[in-house]
Image (tube, coloured by chain):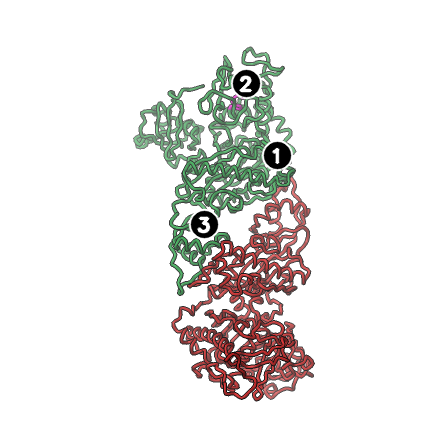
Chain colours: A green, B red
Amino acid sequence: MCTSDDDMVTVVFEPDGNKIRTQPGTSLLDAAVKAGNMIRSECGWNGKCGKCRVVVKDQSHLTGLTVHERRLLSSPEVERGVRLACQAKVKGSVVVFVPPESRVEQRKMQVTGHERPSDLDPAVRKLHVVLPRPTLSDARPDLERLTDALDEYGLDELEIDYDLLRGLPRTLREAEWDVTATVWDDSRIIAVEPGDTSTNIFGAAIDVGTSKIVVYLVDLLTGETRGVGSVENPQIMYGEDILTRVSYTVAEEDGLDVMQRQAVNGVNEALRIACGEADVDPAHVYEAMVVGNTVMHHFLFAVEPRHLSVSPFTPAVKRMLNVGAGKLGIKMNAGGVVSALPIVAGFIGADAVADVLSSGVHESSWTSLLLDIGTNTEIFLGDKDGLTSCSCASGPAFEGGHIRHGMKAVTGAIERIALDPTSYRARYETIGDVQPRGLCGSAMIDVVAELWRHDIIDGTGMFNQGLDTQMLKEANGKAEFVLVPEDESATGHEIVVTQRDVNEVQRAKAAIYSGCSLLLKREKLVGEDIEQILVAGAFGRSLNPENAKTIGLVPDVTADRVRFLGNTAITGSKMALTSRKARMEAVELSKRIGYLELSDDPLFGSEFASALFIPHRDPARFPTVKPG
Amino acid sequence: MCTSDDDMVTVVFEPDGNKIRTQPGTSLLDAAVKAGNMIRSECGWNGKCGKCRVVVKDQSHLTGLTVHERRLLSSPEVERGVRLACQAKVKGSVVVFVPPESRVEQRKMQVTGHERPSDLDPAVRKLHVVLPRPTLSDARPDLERLTDALDEYGLDELEIDYDLLRGLPRTLREAEWDVTATVWDDSRIIAVEPGDTSTNIFGAAIDVGTSKIVVYLVDLLTGETRGVGSVENPQIMYGEDILTRVSYTVAEEDGLDVMQRQAVNGVNEALRIACGEADVDPAHVYEAMVVGNTVMHHFLFAVEPRHLSVSPFTPAVKRMLNVGAGKLGIKMNAGGVVSALPIVAGFIGADAVADVLSSGVHESSWTSLLLDIGTNTEIFLGDKDGLTSCSCASGPAFEGGHIRHGMKAVTGAIERIALDPTSYRARYETIGDVQPRGLCGSAMIDVVAELWRHDIIDGTGMFNQGLDTQMLKEANGKAEFVLVPEDESATGHEIVVTQRDVNEVQRAKAAIYSGCSLLLKREKLVGEDIEQILVAGAFGRSLNPENAKTIGLVPDVTADRVRFLGNTAITGSKMALTSRKARMEAVELSKRIGYLELSDDPLFGSEFASALFIPHRDPARFPTVKPG
């Protein structure tokens, strides 16, 4: 539905300032989910639990109190503007205050990228000191003169980078003993600059993805993201997929050096863009926190990656890394530290640890299923008492790969789509509200769900050739379904979904569902035990939970328990950058999270075969899913 | 006295195995001092305290029991062969066992370079492990697989060198999971080698002197010195003295790099020689412990040294350094660690800390004066409850510099010399028992003492021109005294001591005595409070304590309380290399030792002027010193 902007209203959620454009009639709780705000609800949005209390001062743009609200809210509450988010619907633009008791977890507020870390405590800090000049009666060595001064900040036993020490006598004297020291992790001096530069202290959250490298430039005094840089991973010229790139490092003697240089070049370029946006000198970036899958992680640090590509897929290292920026060639402060979040296993990388960190499932008392959907899909199951993970080869279908008109979640991609029950014509929304060029992952889920719902395909995914509609055509003897006629598309060609596309989505969703199912089995849980399903990944802004369930991508839980989190890798990275507590949590997570190797599981084959059906060969697994 | 070898007897001190050649009639205690063995004595070697008990099984080569021994030794003791070392004199070669209760301190046994460290506990250790191969059900990352195995040796939370990590996957697989890990300080893996190499583990004790670089190759399994390498410091081509070299680093842009490269080249060459001697691959040297004065220390580590050459002579760093061998270019194991002992002040370097460590004065209850005599002389005063230090510019006279026929303590140097009271003809001993080429520092002390004792010079150092002897001549209007006639010398020329030489020695000894005197003043002590004077430095094998006192070089204490220690810098370095306890002591010492800046002391000028006299302008300071 190409909704014109005039029909939409704006809902702002405070105190985070998250803003969303939505249609009139949307409940505040629906709007909150859309905005990535997590509001408590224990009754399935039925107005019965009263947990979703929010405050709206000016209620003129809200629908009136429902019977549920009249029952659950006290008079003073009503006077203060308290409403139940699941009951109140917007008529116009409103500002909604979410009180702390209604938030699911503080942590989760960051998932949308709205940055206000709750515990700003980065590993690097800057301290301005003016040192007494040496005299014959006080000829303390330069380093000890400096550390004695820093001792007054409660930092004793400080170490110093050897390369920094070498030039320290000159630095101190040129600065006339008035310097700012940058200290990493309260243990090591990594930079000494003339004068007071203590307000210039930045960090970089870096997501090295297989296809994209994203850098957030973060002001470490405020926690604010000041610039964002994003580039295509330059390694792509050596192969689109990970395995080709690993093969290159095996085949070519300097292959690993080449891969590292490319990754470093990409990071440097993205960092340059982010710094340029904020007019910040990269020399004032003192720490970088890197996330990425295990292969990207090994590439960036030039750690031998070849054993990641063959069974049993063993990484070189699991723990957190901290390496000098100069050593890696990252163009930030020469003494800066480049850290990487730890990993769990060969297919559960630092990016997946960031997902968990950002989602907060490790702190939640709810039994959660967390999925980061991509070519490999990482799945986590558990709660604050423990998490188990697995990874499944879901293929590139949800990132637009191997799909006739598939594309990534960028401008021009259809991200939501529905079929008219009678005309079968598609209504859709595109990213950027422009003419459509193709379908991104969330749209593919919508398409397959709608095709099945309207009996255009059957449970095996086969098109119903007997259907009487012009939308269903045949090309080269294969069925395909027209979603966008040529005169509506940006390319001038029809946008279709083919039989092959549908099968591709089936294989992808079957792989993911099998992972979920085997994880549940291992933990002796069933679908009904899952209290929330959180989905991360490159789906653009949205994923239709009902449709995800309909095609059998995720276990059958009520749709309100399925939430889309967006890019949690970069937000998790930023959390670890700005909070040492979060960093320690990541370290703990990498040790604690269990790992189930699916290729080692004898049940995988039959699980996968059954999961190829829509929603599943065993309908009992999806009791709430019915054909339309 | 050119004693022929046939007159000499051999005395071996067990359990250390120190061996010394000496003349018949020497007391065991004298022989012990000569051998560097420290035997207790509280009565001034008078046979009264009974502390110097030693055991000699075969007494046929000893003089008989004295009255003192009959009084102090019990019959069972006499039966066991117990003797008082100050009483028993050698008639022939003997083996002497020094029981623990008679040793001054275990520590001091190392000062002669006879290596049997009492607490062998080096910072590097090797551990052989066979790792289980990765499987799908045990796909632990390589590093964690290794650290889990090392955990069984009680080493947890091990870190690893980043450069080592990069190649770890290949190393482990090429070794088929059977490897030996080298761990530094129980905290960091610095090397991983295929197979079991645990018996191949060496360290290097390195003394970077202004003129000479000495390396001891030490087997870290036994503590044994397996090879010694010694080269001239190649920096000499940029200047004989330290200040010229520092000036070079100021004048030339790459001057410091040049100086470092030269120092590293010298160390590499000396290490190569030491390894060659023992047929050890330098790649099996995992740790080096460097000592040297502060400038040499800064040069080797390429730390800006220029401020050491101008008041207030501030070093860049005081603490112990630990730097990767690869980073410095030292040709040992690439992951090896090059450490440097800490320093006290600009003129009290890592070599002086090694002196203290080796001498044991910091553990002694005796009030000790420790001197390391060289171009700069470092002096320490105190006991186990505290030490204060100073440094004085004594000049090169005691190293043969600025002396007509002066030379270093190498083969051909006269090291002991005495004048016949009537003929004034010199009797002397040369290093290597060859014809004399010149005079080393200990001989210069002897010469000046003997000249004064026999009234050939007066208290101001002026030759007595009225003396009727052919030995005293005049050349170019200046007096000079013949020590060796031309037909006796190796050069075919006379060896003489000039008026200028005598004055040079006076200036040197005045500087040193002034340092001692001001240190005593600061500590509110007088000469009589000193219970031992320990002298280190490049004096060859010997220094005549009586003569040192006679010229007023050291305060007037009974000669038996003055001991010569030899090269304590290298033995102190070896102690720190082989014992982490000794290393910690060095760190504590560098923090605890006080420093008196003489150039800041208003009394220095008048002290120095008075000390130019022989023995001193104030004879009361040297009550036991009388002209002959």
Q: Residue at x 57, y 12 (%)?
A: A467
Query: How far across and how far down the image is residue B70, in percent?
Result: 61, 87
Left or right placement of residue A362 versus residue A315 in this view: left
Tell me the amino acid under the disc marked 3. Answer: Ala
Q: Which residue is mark 1?
A: A243
* Viewer-side label of 2, 1: 1
Front-lying residue, B126 or B264: B264
Figure check: B34 above or below A121: below
The residue that disc 2 covers is A496
Above or below, B6 against A506 in this view is below
Q: Does the rendering let one see residue A86?
A: no
Magenta-drawn stretch contains A444: yes
- Label 2: state its secondary structure: strand
Between B39 and B73, the one lying in front of the other is B39
Residue on which the image places disc 3: A191
* Amino acid type, residue under disc 1 in the picture: Leu
Does the magenta portion include A584?
no
